[in-house]
Image (tube, rainbow, N blue to C red):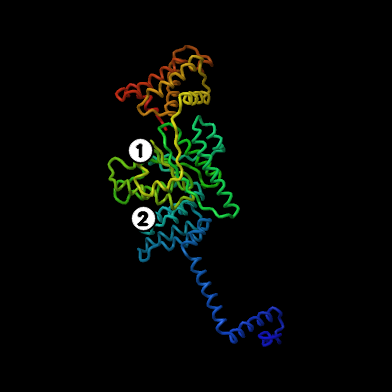
Amino acid sequence: MGGIESRVDTQGIENKFLAHVYFYWMTVKQAAVDHPYIFGGIGFILLTLAIFAVLYTNSEQFLLWRGRRGSTRAMLRLSRRLVRRGIHKDLKAEAKSLMSEARNGYGWAMYNLGTRIGASDDRCFKSHRALSFLWLKKAAAQDEQAREMMYSDPTSATHVHDEENDADPFKELKNMVGLDNVKKSVADITSRTRLFEKRKAAGLPVQQPALHAVFLGNPGTGKTTVARILGRALKQVGYLSRGHVVEVSEGELIGEYVGQTPIKVHRKIQQALGGVLFIDEAYAMLNAAGQGASFSQSAIATLVKYMEDLRHDLVVIVAGYPAEMIEFLDSNPGLKSRFTELIVFPDYSPQELVKIYLRSARDQKYRLDKEAKDSLLELMSEAKENFTHNFSNGRFVRNMFEDTVKYMAIRVGKKAETTKDDLVLIYAEDILAAFRDARRAYSKRDDEKQSIGFMLGRKD
């Protein structure tokens, strides 16, 4: 051996492995003696890298990154940091108990952790939105009890559409009557999202797109139905983890006192995480009865913040009349820029209203006689032209069909004996009787009492 190696004596060491270890150790030791500055510089660099590695792997950013990939241990480490120092020992014990149960995989404990961590007024934890939603997402995936706690609230007016079926959302959208431009817009959204998911699977760089949308249109033009289909479609292509739709009104987002509004918005976002938050008539948030303007602005500002922070697994859709929605979007400087999709829902034509009516009849095994079919298009044309008071398009047709069946039942009930045709055949007189109710309901407000049954039947 030459140089440093020649100075290392390994004689007398019988074990070959130990001889190699001793040889390299003595080599490093001799290098430190012969070249102290170089050796010291290398050692300093390695020590610095080691310190940075330790600090980074214990940082909030790294722990959140691991948490998003399902690491309960990383989420627990981050949660422990949120326990306030110096709080009462009973509160600290309560926090530790929750974390211990979460470590054991209990979904209800994970749910409670997420709720406590995200609440700004909790005494045990500091507010931490990202970690809060990680716990809630894990809780919902963990067991049925946690899902029930998270998505079911018998005291709430919130509608949660969580359809677990094998129906193809794209086929369902295609089969809807009319809405050609809407169908194209949804197809464009899902095609673009599918491309991003394929790039991500291939290890290519992807800038996570935000798919928050504005639906403009009159009542009964299919906005809620399309929102539900879109949620399922985005789950199918891999953008959303759950694909459900949480439908809320402005009253469920605006609090009754200072500080309550952000908490109410937070809870609805919790429910919608992994799916779609659908706010129909969102412009009503600006004029919520009994609430100050600051409360409305607080709700909108909180919503804007969550839309940005959680765009990787949340879609927010706001819907309503075109003119009022423009005012709503202008109410906050950052609100309009958060919505990347604008979809306009046109009113149905008389021919399309007839198709919706006939489809409802066919689905429930009813048939129309020739005279009824001939009069249906004429009646729908009259409705489009003259019913100006809150005309509700497809919803109007569904309610009219239900009233048709009601008058059919009255007619059939007067017969002593009935045949199978009596049970399935709709006559023109049944449709005309239902249309008279509709005319009273939609023509003048003063006449609404005369057709209260039809008006009560108006459903989304």
Label 1 crowd bin: few (<14), some (14–19), many (20+), radius 10 Å:
some
Secondary element under disc 1, as helix, strand or loop, is helix
Whether residue 449 sits left or right of residue 229 in the image: it is: left
Looking at the image, which residue is at 50% across and 72% down?
A: 51
Marker disc for residue 324: 1
Number of the front mark, 2 or 1? 1
Counting every numbered tag in the picture gives 2
The earlier-in-sequence mark between 2 and 1 is 2
- The percent coordinates of residue 140 (x first, y second) are 49, 49
Residue farthest along the top direction in this orientation? 416
Marker disc for residue 120: 2
Dot 1 amino acid type:
Glu
**Along the line of sight, which residue is nearer the eye, 13 or 281?**
281
Marker disc for residue 142: none
* Separation (CA) of disc 2 from disc 1: 32 Å
Label 2 crowd bin: few (<14), some (14–19), many (20+), radius 10 Å:
some
